[in-house]
Amino acid sequence: MPHRALVLIPSYNTGSKLRETVTGALRYWPDVWVVIDGSTDGSDALPALPGLRVVRRAHNGGKGAAVLDGLRPAAAEGFTHVLVMDADGQHPEAEIPAFMAESAQHPEAMILGLPRFDASAPRIRVLGRRLSNVLARWETGTEIGDALFGFRVYPLAPLLTVLQASRHMRGYDFDTEALVRLCWRGVPVRNREAPVRYFRPEEGGVSHFRYGRDNLRLAAMHLRLLFRPCRH
């Protein structure tokens, strides 16, 4: 099938950064879909823009649940690939064309963003992700540059398959577990550098990551993956 890709942005209470992210993405790509994951902060009031489609979920279900609700209609409309990016302004819209071009050249592969951190990155976040990267490489035997960075292009059909086959991957565990399970299915990985910026609250930055809660969830996910007897 011809390579046909869209940008998919799951969003939950991301304030003014959502509109900035959407308008930025539309400057670089003609098809941008936003999944409003039960937002209550008014950020879902997006203008009608050419190329923009908004999917709404009644209740917050987590990043993976929002991605799944975007994938189903995208597959029905004939899209073959999806670039997933965060709504909080951290991911680089200007890199969208380069990631899409690499995906078109290697349509069987995932194009994983390899984050290039600047001084805005919290040191604890940079150090904490190293363990997840090591575990993901161990689980897959694949040279994964970064298991947590959510700026990446997926072949749509395999991603939809692994999400529908599991009750997991609905929240913060989506990025890493989907990556691992796709590797188990034989989807190759290509790593590509991309800058990332963390915004302070006074700059409009919003983060729903909770160090204790979400690191425990990641640990439980890796235990489940490491000791799962049948990898498919």
Image (cartoon, rainbow, N blue to C red):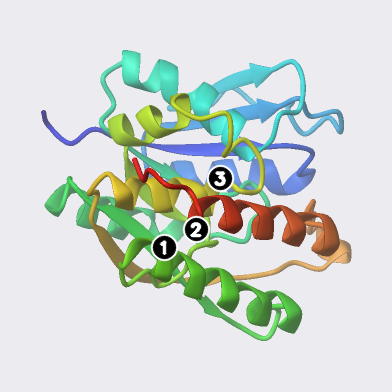
- Measure the alpha-carbon separation of dots 3 and 1: 16 Å
Q: Is residue 93 above or below residue 162?
A: below
Q: Is residue 130 above or below residue 80?
A: below
Q: Residue 187 location in percent, x, y? A: 24, 49
Local secondary structure at mark 3: helix
Q: Can residue 50 be seen here? A: no
Three-letter code for the amino acid on which mark 2 is drawn: Leu
Q: How many residues crowd mark 1 within 10 Å: few (<14), some (14–19), many (20+)? A: some
Quadrant that contains the N terminus: top left
User: Looking at this rendering, what residue extends furthest in the front direction?
Assistant: 229
Q: Is residue 158 left or right of residue 117?
A: left
Q: Nearer the viewer, mark 2 or mark 3?
A: 2
Q: Nearer the viewer, residue 68 or 229?
A: 229
Q: Which residue is mark 1?
A: 139
- Whichever of labels 2 and 3 marks the residue nearer the N terminus, that label is 3
Q: Is residue 198 left or right of residue 116?
A: right
Q: Nearer the viewer, residue 83 or 19?
A: 83
Q: Which residue is mark 3?
A: 174
Q: Which residue is mark 2?
A: 226
Residue at the spot 39% in from the left edge and 46% down from the top edge: 181
Q: How many residues crowd mark 2 within 10 Å: few (<14), some (14–19), many (20+)? A: some
- Measure the alpha-carbon separation of dots 2 and 3: 16 Å
Check contact, mark 1 vs mark 2: CB within 8 A: yes
Three-letter code for the amino acid on which mark 1 is drawn: Glu
Q: Nearer the viewer, mark 3 or mark 1?
A: 1
For residue 98, the mark is none
Q: Residue 198 location in percent, x, y? A: 70, 69
Q: Is residue 104 above or below residue 131?
A: above
Local secondary structure at mark 1: helix
